[in-house]
Image (cartoon, rainbow, N blue to C red):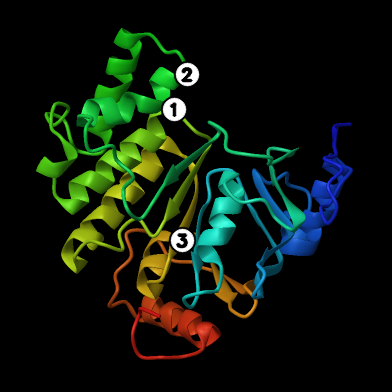
Amino acid sequence: MARVSDGEPGRTDDYTTDDCTTATERADGADRANETPVVLVDGVSKRYESERQSVQALDDVRFTVETGEFVCLVGPSGCGKTTLLRAVAGLETPTNGAVVVDGERVEGPGTDRGMVFQEYGLFPWLTVQENVCFGLERQGMAREACDNRCYEMLDLVGLDGFADAYPKELSGGMKQRVAVARALAVDPEILLLDEPFGSVDARTRERLQNELLDIWRTTEKTTLFVTHEVDEAVVLGDRVLVMGADPGRVVETVDVDLPRPRSRTDEAFVAYTERVRSLIGGGTTDRF
């Protein structure tokens, strides 16, 4: 049995695969108790300390994500959605608890998790092709194989013919497609997206949502998606994890039992969005 311990105070040590099963039962109930989740967030808390104040960003967050699922995180501003996603990515270290991917405790970033940021994160001095190949080259992939993988990913995201363009020559939606292509290029098991469509207009956002669902169906990637937009979460997700604030925590999981593609004017769709809004705390708009 694999056992991981880092010996740091305030951390959950001696983590085992049996712990994964126990935590899964606590987090998602008996219907998932016999499955091994690809992602397990088990009692994750995060506290930021400074000389002036102490901020509890997350408190005892628990959930699982199964292989191939599309799960959305939604909640009010400041509830710790991005902090939680960064913990899954290995970019933040929990103060307490653990993030486990495929039975192994996350101790840092890894190629099994691809991250797409809200602000694109493209290198402006590199071409589209060079941006997409960046991670592949760091892995030591041969140039020809790297280029072939790049062209495959650009075709997947609808940017065939833009390999030689620079980020400044692209629209916001195109830049985000490049970011998705770069994340997928290294063939991660899990795709993590932090409000990737937050800086584009509403029409472009809807188009990108549809394209992301096409990519998800094609690649079958396990996907964890952070958003402020309630309707976006219901359009995309198999499940919506609704977070509360002060401190950040999961207050309820909403299973979205609707066929795709989903219509925002459908009565059942509206009922789901109203349910999620009521859990967040009410309001008449999608953005909190």
Q: Is residue 29 left or right of residue 14?
A: left
The residue to which callout 1 is attached is 186
Labels 2, 1: front one:
2
Q: Amino acid at mark 3?
A: Val
Say whether marks 2 and 1 touch (CB < 8 Å).
yes
Residue nearest the observer in this picture, 161 or 270: 161
Q: Residue at horizontal 53%, vertical 31%? A: 111
Residue 33, x across and y down, in percent? 78, 54
Q: Which mark is residue 139?
A: 2
Q: Indicate the quadrant containing the C terminus: top left, top right, bottom left or bottom right.
A: bottom left
User: Which amino acid lies under the numbered mark 2 shown in the image of this protein?
Assistant: Gln
Q: Are marks 3 and 1 in contact (CB under 8 Å)?
A: no
Q: Is residue 67 above or below residue 71?
A: above
Tell me the number on the disc at residue 226: 3
Residue 239 in view of the camera? no
Could you say which disc has been placed on residue 207 in the image?
none
Q: Residue at x 80, y 56 (%)?
A: 23
Mark pair 2, 1: CA separation: 9 Å
Residue drawn 41% across and 22% down? 136
- Looking at the rendered structure, the kind of residue marked 1 is Val
